[in-house]
Image (cartoon, helix red, strand yellow):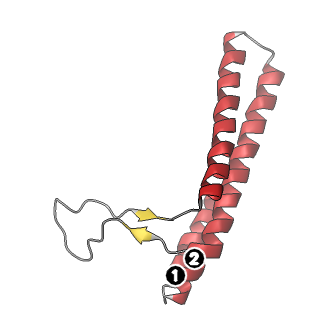
Amino acid sequence: MEHQNSLDCGNFKSTECVHRHKATPRGEKELRQLQNRLKRMMGQLGGIANMLEDNRYCGDILMQVAAVESALQALGYVMLQDHMETCVVEEIQNGNTAIVDEAIELVKKLK
């Protein structure tokens, strides 16, 4: 799976060249699954907002917060696995071993 830079500025510095944007093409099925996970979490967050408005019991709200946190963590692990199996492997094969440092930092942030 090849990730692409929509803007490759190289060493050139200019006001026109602000950021490099990396993209990872995903299959339609994979994208739909990720979006469905995210939509469920958004629904859960809306449910938490409603629970707050209804002055629901703190313990019930905290259980829902924990469920959203768990779902978000699971999404992060799915994304990390995909990143390691595709982008990181590809970059190493292309001789970019610095990608390992990036991957380690991502793992640290997901803990």
Q: Residue furthest front?
A: 28
Res 88 label? 2
> CA gap, disc 1 to disc 2?
5 Å
Left or right placement of residue 60 versus residue 104 in this view: right
Q: Is residue 102 above or below residue 44?
A: below
Query: Which quadrant: the N terminus?
Result: bottom right
Q: Quadrant of residue 29?
A: bottom right
Disc 1 element:
helix
Label 1 sits on residue: 91
Q: Position of residue 72 (x, y in %)?
A: 68, 46
Residue nearest the viewer, comparing 19 with 39? 39
Q: Position of residue 53 (x, y in %)?
A: 66, 11
Compared with 40, 12 (above or below) is below
Q: In this rendering, would 80 be left or right of 97?
A: right
Name the amino acid, label 1: Glu
* Figure check: 53 above or below 32: above
Where's residue 78, x and y in %? 69, 59
Point 60% across, 74% down: residue: 86
Which image quadrant is residue 51 in?
top right
Pointer 2 local density, CA inside 10 Å: few below 14, some 14–19, many at least 20: many
Disc 2 residue type (three-letter): Val
Residues 58 and 37: in front is 37
Can residue 110 be seen here? The reply is: no
- Residue occupying the point 50% across, 75% down: 2
Q: Residue 67 placed where, x, y %?
A: 78, 37
Q: Is 94 displayed left or right of 104 in the figure?
A: left
Q: Could you say whether the residue bearing mark 2 is in a helix, strand or loop?
A: helix
Q: Is the C-beta separation of discs 1 and 2 under 8 Å?
A: yes
The C terminus appears in which quarter of the rendering? Answer: bottom right
Asked if one can make out residue 41 in the rendered structure from this viewpoint, the answer is: yes
